[in-house]
Each structure stands twice: as structure tokens, then as C-alpha cells.
Image (tube, rainbow, N blue to C red):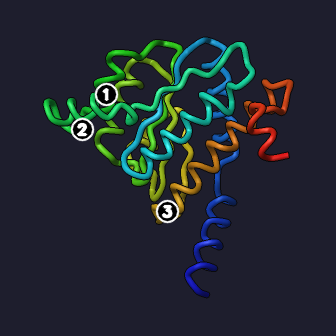
Amino acid sequence: MNLTESYIQLLKDTLDQLDRDQINLAIDAFLKVRNAGGTIYTFGNGGSGASASHAAGDFLKGASYGLEKRFRVICLNDNIPSMMAIANDIGWDEIFIEPLKNFLQPHDLVIGISGSGNSTNVVKAMQYAKEQGVTTIAFCGYKGGKIKELADIVIHSKAMDMEIAEDIHMIVFNIIKKEMINRLHTSNSMGSQYDERVK
């Protein structure tokens, strides 16, 4: 089997192993925080940071467009100046926990993304959220790592492969977004210009 076929097969197998109950709990958590007027915080490093940013954008626009009551989502790794200031003056391990100390409220939702599940800055932020009694979701891969043990809800890509973990995480974020659109929207429109492009 060549690399293309083996990658596709591993992705399929990993999707089949996803815990559907945990996905449903994540869907419920997103709906609960939106209804309570809370904020969703996403964060991660590298590719996981890109997924955190992508997901935040999808919920700020895609899942929120046309709704009177919208999703409040902040990606903590999108504010480069504050992140670099914290890393430079305090330490890289503090880049996510420090802004949570500024913003976190009881009805919020904290989503840490780490392929290994062991990135110290993600672990520390998740631990802080847990100590504050805030609901947490871990998006992890490999063996799940420390955030798997910390989180209330776990989206675990069980393959020992970073790229597969990144794929799985975005698939699950897209499932949650689609579910929010299905439950909350009365119109299929994502904006007049979008509608024109895809018709």
C-alpha cells in the first residue's frame, strides 16, 4: 500500500474509533455556553493553533451568521503581541493561562488543542480552567496525554500520527458547527455573496 492509500486508510480507521458520545457532549457544551452568553476560548501551538484559529472563525461567522444571539469565541493564539509579550517576559508556558486570568467567567468553555496532549502551555491553561470550575474540552491525539485526563470532554484521535490528529480535530469542529447551524438557523444563507458563489 502506498503512502496516499495508507494515510487515507488510517484517517478512515481513526474516524471509526471516534467516541460519538464525547462529540455529542461537545455539541451540548457549545449550545449551553452560547445560550448562557458565555465565551468559548480555543488555543494550541503550531498546527493545533491554526485549528484553534480556524474553529474560532467558523463560529464567529459560519455558526453565528443571521442569529440574534451569537457565539462568542476568542482564539488565544491569535493575539500575537500579547502572546509574545507573555512569552518574552514571563515564559512560553504561560501564554494561554495568563489571558484566561483576565477573561475567564463561570459560564465559559475552554478548549485546549494539543496533538500530544502534553504541551505544557495548554496543560496549564486547562488546569487553571478546571480549578475555576469551567467546562473544558480536550482535542488530543496519540495517547491523549495530560489534557485527556484533565478535561471534562475529550475528542481523542487515537492514531499515533500528528497529521491525522489535526485532520480529525477539524472534522469534529466542522461537525459541531454543522450541528449548531442545523439546530439554530432558520435560513441556509451564509451571506448573499457566499450564496451567489455556490449556487
Question: Between residues 85 and 96, which one lies in front from this camera angle?
Answer: 85
Question: Helix, strand or loop at disc 2?
Answer: helix
Amino acid residing under circle 1? Ile
Location of residue 172 in the rendering, given as x and y in whole percent from the top left corner? 63, 46
Looking at the image, is 159 positioned above or below residue 125? Answer: below
Label 3 Cα neighbours within 10 Å, binned few <14 / some 14-19 / many ≥20:
some
Label 2 Cα neighbours within 10 Å, binned few <14 / some 14-19 / many ≥20:
some
Q: CA distance from mark 2 to mark 3?
A: 23 Å
Looking at the image, is 76 positioned above or below residue 19? Answer: above
Amino acid residing under circle 3? Glu
Going from N to C along the chain, the mark reached first, 2 or 3, is 2
Label 1 Cα neighbours within 10 Å, binned few <14 / some 14-19 / many ≥20:
many
- The reply, left or right, for residue 158 in relation to residue 142 is right
Identified at 54% across, 34% down, the residue is 56
Identified at 64% across, 72% down, the residue is 8
- The reply, left or right, for residue 20 in relation to residue 71 is right
- For disc 1, the marked residue is 97
Identified at 63% across, 27% down, the residue is 30
Q: CA distance from mark 3 to mark 1?
A: 26 Å
Question: Helix, strand or loop at disc 1?
Answer: helix
- For disc 3, the marked residue is 163
